[in-house]
Image (spheres, rainbow, N blue to C red):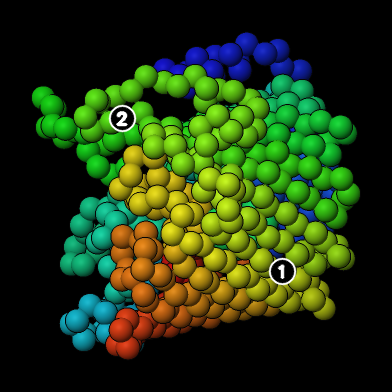
Amino acid sequence: MRFLLLFFCILSIPLSAQVYTLPIDGFSQLRQNRAEIGVQQSLHFGAKPILRSDADLSEVPGFAEDTVPYYYKLTEKIFSEHLIELDKPDFKIYADFLFDFAVGRETVDQISGTGEETSLFQNTRGFAIQGQIGKRVFFYTDFRENQGRYPSYLTRFIDSTEVFPGSGRVKPFGVGGFDYSMASGVLGIEAADWLNFSLGHSKQIIGHGYRSLLLSDNSHNYPFVAYEVDFLGEKIQYRYTLALLQSLDRLPQGETPEAIFKRKESTWHYLSFKPLPNLELGFFEEILWQVFDDSLGSKPFNYRALLPIPFLNSAILGLEDEENNARVGISAAWYPIPKMRLYGQLLSNSSGFRIDGYQIGGLWSGIFDRVDFQLELNQSNPNATVQPAELQSAYHFNQPLGHVLGRDFEELVGVITYYHRRIYARITTAYYNLGDEASNLWSLRNTEVSNSDFRLGYIFNPSCNFQIYTGYTYRSEEVEKEKLSNGFWYLGIKTSMSNIYSDF
């Protein structure tokens, strides 16, 4: 009801610039980085998704005009266009199939205890539709139905959390497999050149790195309403979001056969300042509002959540309020040269604004017009967030809203990508150790983990990242001097317009 009231207020604004949002998957962002859109004055790259109308995309493959002659309509669809394209002055629509068909096999398994090499597969089918109505209304929706059998470390994660990484709840499928689905939908309105609204069921990201300690696309989709305001010639941008989250703990059993899950609400304020095209500073506030108490039941909506003033609620509540969890942070990026980004984050969840987590990273895009190199250090102490079982924790569907590891960890991530003429090779390595109070549901404390993946592929169509790919992943963990390893190869064909993080 709260979301509907706010949405009807949004619809009452008169509408009068093509608008959609930029995709946030890894290869789309790689092409955006190489085109140097991060140093465009009008673009605040630290808050995603980003309106396409905010950026000059004339040099970005997948958005720029494709001048390659394909001769046949079929080859145009395979290599350049969306599957369905309707482009009229007052109505535009683009549609694509989403799929991921892959097979693989474990070569090393010391986690499950069976010692058997397991055959793996992924079977994803779905669609994505985006479009524009009039000059200032845009929409996006997608749906994926998935079945799969996964390597032992992912199976352990799924069994412990009851969800697939980045997605929702699972149910058994066949022998050792899982079935799950995922749906997204966003309706947006650009009410003015300096003001836009959106409502939907999707994800957001705050940050410039591979990971984010503040807010990432690591967890499941959530319902939200949001608005964004630009000031001072787009040098200042303010983004407000009200989201509905939930745990996977159920309410006390009532007359219904299956009780609903306990829910919580969150507000995110992000104020971004871009004094120079190559310098961006962002200030983040998150309040997780407890709307259910085990002894009192449902609690009334706290209308302070609607206040559009950053850091006012955290100042009123403090950062250690027993009912409503407040977290604040800073996200920054500096471009010494247009294709080199140095970035970082600070996070505090403690009184006195002590630092409870930090990120330091660098990305150099398009070295020799072919190679991208990224190195990132993330650290978080036990105060970075509360346990996932708490009703005011920064978790949604048993997954952290920020960094995939939650809290009490140290991590080093490196990514090297060769990408030229649609051929790519990528090496991703994550090394981390978990402390005594790590808040993961799926792994032991005091664990050292190394996860490396090598992937080779060819992207036929950058509009939807239609590609074939193959690769090998090797993961090892050491617990109390006992080393457990898991390795597997894979081969597949897919489209890709979102991120799935399995490198933990």
Q: Residues within 10 Å of mark 1 (few under 14, many from 20)?
A: many
**Residue at x 13% of width, y 32% of height:** 253
- Residue 292 circle label: 2
* The one of 402 and 289 positioned closer to us in this rendering: 289
**Residue at x 73% of width, y 54% of height:** 332
Q: Quadrant of residue 197?
A: top right
User: Which residue is the site of mark 1?
Assistant: 362
> Where 424 falls versus 333 (above or below)?
below
Q: Is residue 89 left or right of residue 147?
A: right
Q: Is residue 230 left or right of residue 105?
A: right
Q: Quadrant of the C terminus?
A: bottom left
> Where 35 falls versus 388 (above or below)?
below
Q: Is residue 458 left or right of residue 34?
A: left
Q: Quadrant of residue 155?
A: bottom left
Give the percent coordinates (x, y) of residue 498: 54, 54
Q: Is residue 200 visible?
A: no
* The one of 293 and 233 positioned closer to us in this rendering: 293
Q: CA distance from mark 2 to mark 1?
A: 41 Å
The three-letter amino acid code for the residue at tag 2 is Phe
Tag 2, which secondary structure? strand
Give the percent coordinates (x, y) of residue 497: 56, 54
**Residue at x 73% of width, y 26% of height:** 195
Q: Viewer-nearest of labels 2 and 1? A: 2
Residue positioned most to the front: 352
* The one of 206 and 10 positioned closer to us in this rendering: 206
Q: Residues within 10 Å of mark 2 (few under 14, many from 20)?
A: some
The three-letter amino acid code for the residue at tag 1 is Gly
* The one of 20 and 295 positioned closer to us in this rendering: 295
